[in-house]
Amino acid sequence: MVTTELVLGGARSGKSRLAEQLAMASGLKVVYVATATADDDEMAERIQRHQQDRPAEWLLVEEPVDLARVIRTYNKPEYCVLIDCLTLWLTNCLFNDDFPQPWAEYKSELLVALAGAQCRVIMVSNEVGQGIVPLGQVSRQFVDQSGWLHQAIAQQVDRVTFVTAGLSQVLKGPAFA
């Protein structure tokens, strides 16, 4: 049985749509965890569009950094926690001085919460490491940390799926029914 999973893909690959379909098909109470923050008008519009597209019965939790706390809060078998997306979460943790903990602590806490998950957890993230090595130090740091995060999560989750052009390929774990 799949309890924890990671859905990876590029921008506009269909990864969020797949994750939402999996959450809906789970038959569980869905808790949608949005990590985005509206720092500009375009992002505010994007967030509003996403909110309108989601089922009204899904509980929305807006949490830019403390994903481990959210998983612990809803850590019961009747919940499906859908986190969209880890890439924005990583950006929030790495580049926002308002958050008190270092990135390594947020990452470690997430991995511990996942290891103890009794709820279903579906995480969405952008695969950014398949291109060339970025020129700038900040960009390289982001790509490196993203890759290491994905590797750590992939080792401990039940299923990892890669999505390209709306087509999903299971890399680890059971195929879709």
Image: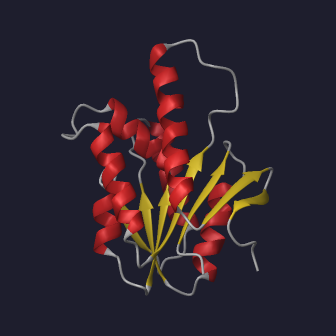
**Residue lying furthest front:** 155
Measured as percent of width and height from the top left, residue 52 is found at 53, 65
In the rendered structure, the answer to whether residue 81 lies left or right of residue 104 reads: right
Image quarter hosting the C terminus: bottom right
Is 102 located above or below residue 111 in the figure? above
Is 88 located above or below residue 162 in the figure? above
Depth check: 175 or 96 in front?
175
Q: Quadrant of residue 90?
A: top left
Is 138 located above or below residue 95 in the figure? above
In the rendered structure, the answer to whether residue 64 lies left or right of residue 148 reads: left
Measured as percent of width and height from the top left, residue 26 is found at 59, 82
Q: Residue at x 59, y 76 (%)?
A: 2
The tally of labels here is 0
Measured as percent of width and height from the top left, residue 44 is found at 45, 45
**Residue lying furthest top:** 135
Image quarter hosting the N terminus: bottom right
**Residue lying furthest left:** 100
Is 132 located above or below residue 24 in the figure? above
Q: Residue at x 48, y 52 (%)?
A: 47
Measured as percent of width and height from the top left, residue 36 is found at 43, 48
In the rendered structure, the answer to whether residue 162 lies left or right of residue 144 reads: right
